[in-house]
Amino acid sequence: MPDSVSQLEMFPFIGEEVDVGYDNAQVVILPVPYEATTTYRVGCQDGPAALLAASDQLEYYDVELERETCFEVGIHTHAPIADTRQGTVSETEMLETTRNTIARCTADGKFVVSVGGEHSITAGVVAGYRQALGDEPFTVVQIDAHGDLRAEYEGSRYNHACVMHRVLELGCPSLPVGIRSLCREEAELIRSRNIPVFWDEDIAGDPNWIDRAIDSIATEKVFLTVDLDGLDPGLMPGVGTPQPGGLGWRQTLKFLRRLCGDRTLIGADIMELCPLSDSVVSEFTAAKLTYKIVGYRELARSRQGASTRFR
């Protein structure tokens, strides 16, 4: 395990003994250590390295699923892309590189979990799936504290606060979950587009919110984007823009298990991990969340008798 999570080297997810190489992997972990538009706490470009380092402490065996998922699916950790730790990366370069990498991995039959990095990366990730799937519809399920629906922010259309606006422009419906912070512009867009937001305060008082959320998804295929500030900051303090409230651990897992079981998950990302200098709670929780997503998808596929290929 590395002494510093800010070093340029990336460690394989869970460990070298798990990595089966790209050709043999069903699951690809894609680090995107990109940070250019952070507006509060900086450091999310170090998130991927921190998550991968923490994953070395994960147990192979998932108690809930009663299986060693990592040895069933075959996992490979991709080389980092759009890495601002090594110098400036333009918005255009980040988006193009991310889109092309996702499209290539998808064409090769891989299930990709991208780890960032700031949330603006998701625009490139979703564009990659749009390129790979063509006109085939999919919904972007967004766990987040913020709407991220501004048309532009601080002079940029690709600020992290604008990512879901870019997703809508790609023609993808969205399902925002856990939202508890908006500007007026975003509130008006939600009303005008009739976006089915599952507000944090409503989730807290509705024991049936997961049923309603899943039922509101009109497409069979879904992409999951997790801004880690969507979780309770007591559970996930290491984020760039924390907000009071948010999903608890068991709430999150229950929702994700249902999502993977009732819909076809085509890919996922985990964004906005901003490591703290005196705690490893956030990165370990993010690493475990990544492993749970892989496990829930594999459980659903095994129950459906799916082939070992992504598509």
Image: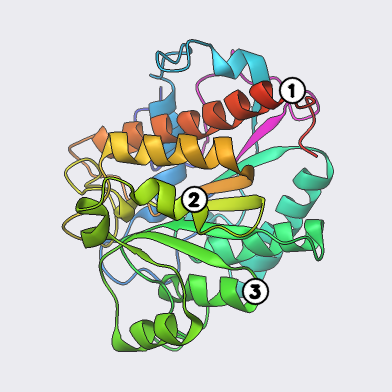
Cα–Cα span, label 1 and label 2: 22 Å
Secondary structure under tag 1 reads: loop
- Which residue carries the number 3 mark? 92
Secondary structure under tag 3 reads: helix
Looking at the rendered structure, the kind of residue marked 1 is: Gly
Question: Who's the residue at 37% across and 82% down the image?
Answer: 186
Q: Residues within 10 Å of mark 3 (few under 14, many from 20)?
A: few
How is the model colour-coded? Answer: rainbow
Looking at the rendered structure, the kind of residue marked 2 is: Ile
Please give the label number shown on residue 214.
Answer: 2
Q: Judge by depth and name the residue closer to the eye, 252 or 117.
A: 252
Instruction: Please name which of the two marks, 3 or 1, marks the residue nearer to the observer.
Output: 1
Question: Who's the residue at 56% across and 18% down the image?
Answer: 69
Q: Judge by depth and name the residue closer to the eye, 162 or 181.
A: 181
- Which residue carries the number 1 mark? 305
Q: Quadrant of the N terminus?
A: top left
